[in-house]
Amino acid sequence: MEKIVIAVGSMSCQRCVQSVNAALRTLPGVQQVDVDLDAGQASVTCDPGRVSVAELRKAVEEAGFDAG
């Protein structure tokens, strides 16, 4: 497992945190997600053989947020 940190922009409330969390958890290989509203980032523990950083960012963007 690997821990990947992604910058997440446009979050303003706990509902946003829940949306990002849900979007990332649906991806294959994702084991744990911790979204920090104040830091503007998501820490994802995942299997890099099953999910890529690009796929993680895409899931965040498809949920309506900026991913860096």
Image: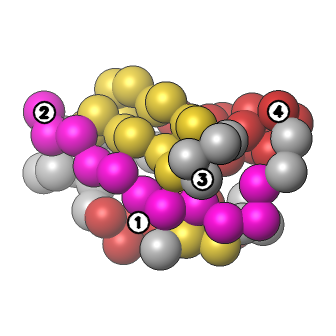
Specify start and end residues of the magenta stretch as a single range.
1-11
Q: Position of residue 47 (x, y in %)?
A: 18, 40
Q: In the structure shown, which secondary structural element does the residue marked by tag 1 occupy?
A: helix
- Residue assigned mark 4: 14
Q: In the structure shown, which secondary structural element does the residue marked by tag 4 occupy?
A: helix
Q: Can you see residue 26?
A: no
- In this rendered view, identify the residue nearer to me: 55 or 8: 8
Query: Residue 19, relative to residue 54: is it above or below?
Result: above
Label 3 neighbourhood size at 10 Å, few (<14), some (14-19), many (20+)?
some
Question: Quick check: marks 4 and 2 in contact, CB under 8 Å?
Answer: no
Q: Position of residue 31 (x, y in %)?
A: 34, 26
Query: Residue 5, relative to residue 3: is it above or below?
Result: below
- Residue assigned mark 1: 55
Foreground: disc 4 or disc 2: 4
Which amino acid type is marked by label 1? Glu
Query: Residue 52, relative to residue 43: is it above or below?
Result: below
Q: In the structure shown, which secondary structural element does the residue marked by tag 2 occupy?
A: loop
- Residue assigned mark 2: 1
Foreground: disc 2 or disc 3: 3
Question: Quick check: marks 3 and 4 in contact, CB under 8 Å?
Answer: no
